Image (spheres, helix red, strand yellow):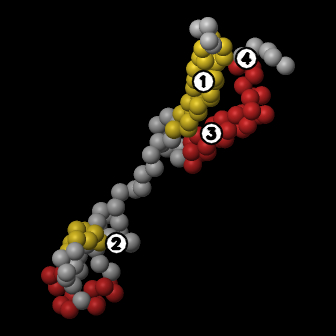
Amino acid sequence: MLKPFTIDELPNLAGGRERVRINNQIEAAVRDCINRPGLKAARKVKIEMELVPTPGEEGYCESVDTELVSAVSLPKSRSAPFTMKAATDADGTAEQHWNDERRDNPRQHTIDEMADKPGGGEGGTAA
């Protein structure tokens, strides 16, 4: 049945698939709020309606091609910072070294590591 389109008809477009798609995007934004409550950046669900006229032979608007464009925008994910030691291996290849037990100090060695080094490690003392 031909009837005027209003926002009330939005859930009925494409047999309800548009409603499901947009609800999924809203759910993704809410899920991110639940998972990262300390991140105060906005989560956004944008819905745009694009209307493009199709002119008839006599120059009048014969129809309007209409498309819903929606997108969810979430803040970037970031890890906690890791301090890594820059070094080169025997072949001169640049590397980063990290300490899985002290992520703030890659130069901190364990007792086991110190026992394996001749002279007790760097400079002969444990860091």
Give the mark nearer the N terminus: 3 vs 4: 4
Give the mark nearer the N terminus: 2 vs 4: 4
Q: Amino acid at mark 3?
A: Gln
Residue drawn at x 70%, y 19% is: 7
Location of residue 44 (image quadrant): top right
- Closest to the observer: 52 or 9? 52
Give the mark nearer the N terminus: 3 vs 2: 3
CA neighbours of label 2 inside 10 A, class few (<14), some (14 to 19), many (20+) = some
Distance Cα–Cα, label 1 vs label 2: 51 Å
- Of tags 3 and 4, which is closer to the observer? 4
Give the mark nearer the N terminus: 1 vs 4: 4
**Residue linked to disc 3:** 25
Instruction: Say the numbered circle drawn on residue 99.
Output: 2
Distance Cα–Cα, label 3 vs label 2: 39 Å
**Left or right: where does residue 120 sit relative to residue 19?**
left
**Left or right: where does residue 28 sit relative to residue 85?**
right
**Residue linked to disc 1:** 49
**Residue linked to disc 4:** 5
Q: Amino acid at mark 1?
A: Met
Going by the picture, which residue comes out furthest to the right? 1
- Of tags 1 and 2, which is closer to the observer? 1
Residue 94: give x, y in percent of width and height: 22, 71
